[in-house]
Image: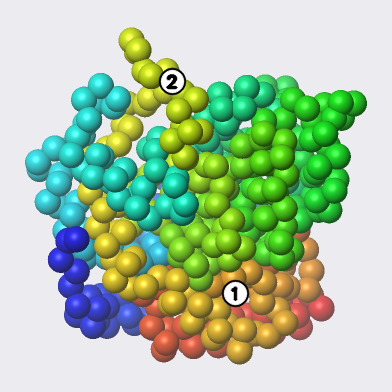
Amino acid sequence: MCEIPAMDAVWSEANGHALPTLITAIPGPRSQAAVDVLARHESPGITARRARQGEARGVGKDPIVWDRAAGANVWDLDGNRFVDLTAAFGVALIGHAHPAVVAAVQEQAPRLLHGMGDVFPNGPRIALMERLAAVAPGDLSQCILTGGGAEAVEAALKTAALASGRPGVLAFWGSYHGLSYGALPATAYKDDFRRPFHGQLGQHVTHLPYGCDLALIDALLAGPATGGELIGAILVEPMLGRGGNVVPPAGWLAGLRRIADERGVILIFDEVYTGLGRTGAWWAGDHDGVVPDVLCAGKALAGGMPIGVAIATPEVMGAWGRSVGEAIHTATFIGHPVVAAAALATLDVMAAMDVPALARAFEAAARARFGERVRGRGAMLGLALPSPGAAARVMGRALKRGVITLPGGVHGDILGLTPPLALSDAQRDHAFDVLAAAIAEEEAAHG
Ligand SMILES: Cc1ncc(COP(=O)(O)O)c(C=O)c1O
């Protein structure tokens, strides 16, 4: 274990525990000037075009441009300080720029800044895989490390195709598995993501409603007229994240496990968002006591550095066979030593913080404050809003008061809360006051 600085020293006022201070308009002049440059040089599909359309929809103008972050605070280029309830898509679960992670990066960077993919392994990469085998559920113990979540999903799908010998995949409406060409056919969160590229996407994925009747799944897989007999993998988020913080019906994941076993299908849990304590258990599958054949993790795993992993049982991963000649799965940056060192430090901090307990405490506070509005589990919650598209407007209203949130849900009516767990009680209560005011304003304006 690396040395973990005492929490009170780490999360002092100056280091991420402060309430918002807004010293210019949101967005301020520096952010606006930077977004002008962005609009000229970044693909319009990414940030600036949406921001400028947002102005017309009354959801704020340009985005703030992030300058620095610590704990649960983010500062923009204009010096405004915010409380972040997103952890940047869930990544900063232990807090932005945790000192233990920063120290691990600083120590590793001058030693071995990058490795050599699959050809020559490096120490931190090996140590990380050993560590992941210890933290993964059941006997999941063999890894493919990747540069992000979508790549981890792709590695899991390849593994399942090899292990089952069948190309088909069952996934679920509302799911988000990433946007790269291997993950996108399974993603069914918004049609906009797929429509322009439909002709280039694999047609091997069948979708059913999330949480649907298990008998339907069984009938699909039974075939023969359904095409389901070609399905070799079930890919599922054990709680829907971007799709609206949907907790599956009790027993549903266990039902998927049973059906997968009966039909010789590989069960993949995409825990890129839910994993590592965010839902109040180390893995979202733990809530139902279910262990998949392959688990994907990412986001929070390296404390802010880019990473993903597909981790499987030796039996399932063994389907790759022994690597002879060139590895048939690799990437230039696979098992990057600085990222691996950051992940090792992050896992130490997560254990010391007891992330699941903090996540459960956040959920209790949110439920006490927002009651029936609350969806989800742990520190992966959504607040249900009255109308489609309302979440983006509430996000804009909260941002102007110094609180960062994200819209979610397939209809844009869920305000996503996935805070860094460095959030203090005072920050949390202040942020909740801001959200309550923003929601009240939205309801007054749009009913
Ligand atoms: C459940 C889930 N899977 C996969 C991904 C894709 O991860 P990445 O954006 O790192 O490729 C995400 C991203 O939000 C996700 O929430």
Q: Amino acid at mark 1?
A: Arg
Dividing the picture into quadrants, the one containing residue 377 is bottom right
For mark 2, what is the residue? 321
SS category of the residue bearing label 1: helix
Residue 232, above or below 399: above
For the point 49% across and 82% down, the residue is: 361
Question: Residue at image x 59%, y 56%?
Answer: 290
The amino acid on which the numbered mark 2 sits, given as a three-letter code, is Gly
Distance from disc 2 to disc 1, alpha carbons, whole Å, reads 54 Å
In the rendered image, residue 439, in percent from the top left (x then y), is placed at 67, 80
Residue 111 point in image, percent of width and height:
9, 41
- In the rendered image of this protein, does residue 408 appear above or below residue 330? below
The x and y percentages for residue 341 are 22, 49
| Spot occupied by residue 215 in the image (x, y as percentages of width and height) | 85, 48
Q: Secondary structure at mark 2?
A: loop
Question: Closest to the observer: 358 or 23?
Answer: 358
Question: Which residue is most to the front?
Answer: 262
**Is label 1's Cβ within 8 Å of ligand 1?**
no
- Of all residues shown, which one is farthest toward the left? 111
Q: Is residue 186 visible?
A: no
**How many numbered callouts?**
2
State the quadrant of the C terminus. Answer: bottom right
Side of 393 where 311 appears, left or right: left
Please give the residue where the numbered disc 1 appears in the rendered image. Answer: 397
Tell me if residue 202 comes above or below residue 249 in the rendering: above
Give the quarter of the figure containing the N terminus: bottom left
Would residue 312 appear left or right of 375 to someone viewing this image?
left
Crowding around mark 1 (Cα neighbors within 10 Å: few <14, some 14 to 19, many 20+) is: many
